[in-house]
Image (cartoon, rainbow, N blue to C red):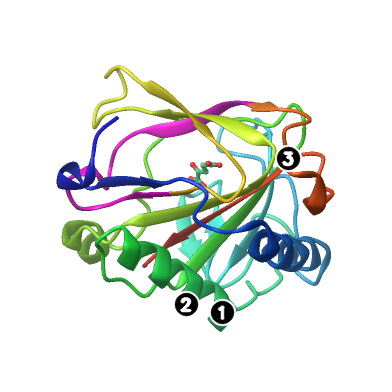
């Protein structure tokens, strides 16, 4: 597992279960609210294997650009990122040794068959990526088999089991490392959350 000197920090069980319950309830509301969750269709016509909601800016899966409204779906404006979400992400980043005020949050819901192919997060501004502002992720619910690779798609990937409450941060020289989710492990969520699946929140600075 790469470490802080390489820009990668895994904060196991960063968020206690009580905090996870609060965050999971907010994620549910946002998924079900106006401009809530939908299953995006990507370039080439395939459906993603997650339900997604974007806060702060909408990530368009057809153009791979951020925009104000959901041009690929229903034209609804992206809801703002709640101040408490941005503050939470800044705290996680600080614990990982980074200073950042994220202005985008993508919430992904993974059902039992959820997964996400290996990709780089490179649609933020060139200035943000050059500055190495990290991607900050926090997981809730079922454990995910997260794959963390290198800067080239063909580099070896390391499987990491991200559990509920875990935060994972990669920035600086690691900002463009490939990553994805190969599977969810059903039945592993803390019972107190009442989740049959997984929420993952990723924060970035545009
Ligand atoms: O679900 C995860 O842990 C990763 C999500 C992800 O890769 C993304 O939103 O870009």
Residues at marks 1 and 2, CA–CA distance in whole angstroms: 5 Å
Disc 2 packing (10 Å; few <14; some 14–19; many ≥20): some
Q: Are marks 1 and 2 in contact (CB under 8 Å)?
A: yes
**Residue 101 in which image quadrant:** bottom left
The residue carrying mark 2 is: 87
| Magenta run includes residue 24 | no
Q: Residue at x 47, y 77 (%)?
A: 87
Residue at the image point whose x is 19% and y is 52% from the top:
172
Residue beneath disc 3: 189
Q: Is residue 200 above or below residue 56?
A: above
Instruction: Write down the quadrant of residue 179 in the picture.
Output: top left
Magenta residue span? 168-183
Q: CA distance from mark 3 to mark 2?
A: 25 Å
Along the horizontal axis of the image, is 134 left or right of 40?
A: left
Q: Position of residue 99 (x, y in %)?
A: 26, 71
- Residue 113: image location, x then y, percent: 74, 26
> What secondary structure is marked by label 2?
helix
Which circle's residue, 1 or 3, is located before the other in the chain? 1
Q: Which mark is residue 84?
A: 1
At numbered mark 1, what does the secondary structure look like: helix, strand or loop?
helix
Instruction: Reply yes or no: does residue 175 show up in magenta.
Output: yes
Where residue 153 sits: x, y (%)? 31, 24
The 10 Å Cα crowd at callout 1, few under 14, some 14 to 19, many 20 or more, is few
Residue 55 visible in the current orientation: yes
């Amino acid at each position: 597992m790469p470490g802080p000197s390489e820009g990668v920090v895994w904060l196991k069980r960063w968020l206690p279960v009580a905090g996870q319950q609060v965050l999971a309830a907010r994620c549910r509301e946002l998924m079900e609210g106006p401009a809530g969750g939908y299953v995006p269709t990507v370039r080439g016509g395939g459906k993603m294997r997650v339900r997604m909601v974007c806060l702060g800016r909408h990530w368009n899966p057809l153009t791979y650009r951020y925009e104000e409204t959901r041009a690929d779906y229903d034209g609804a404006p992206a809801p703002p990122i709640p101040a408490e979400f941005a503050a939470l992400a800044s705290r996680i980043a600080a614990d990982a040794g980074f200073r950042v005020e994220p202005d985008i949050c993508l919430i992904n819901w993974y059902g039992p068959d959820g997964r996400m192919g290996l990709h780089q997060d490179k649609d933020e501004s060139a200035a943000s990526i050059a500055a190495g502002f990290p991607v900050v992720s926090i997981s809730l619910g079922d454990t995910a088999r997260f794959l963390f690779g290198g800067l080239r798609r063909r580099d070896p990937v390391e499987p990491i089991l991200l559990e509920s409450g875990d935060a994972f941060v990669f920035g600086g020289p690691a900002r463009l490392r490939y990553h994805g989710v190969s599977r969810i492990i059903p039945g592993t969520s803390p019972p107190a959350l009442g989740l049959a699946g997984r929420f993952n929140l990723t924060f970035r600075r545009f």
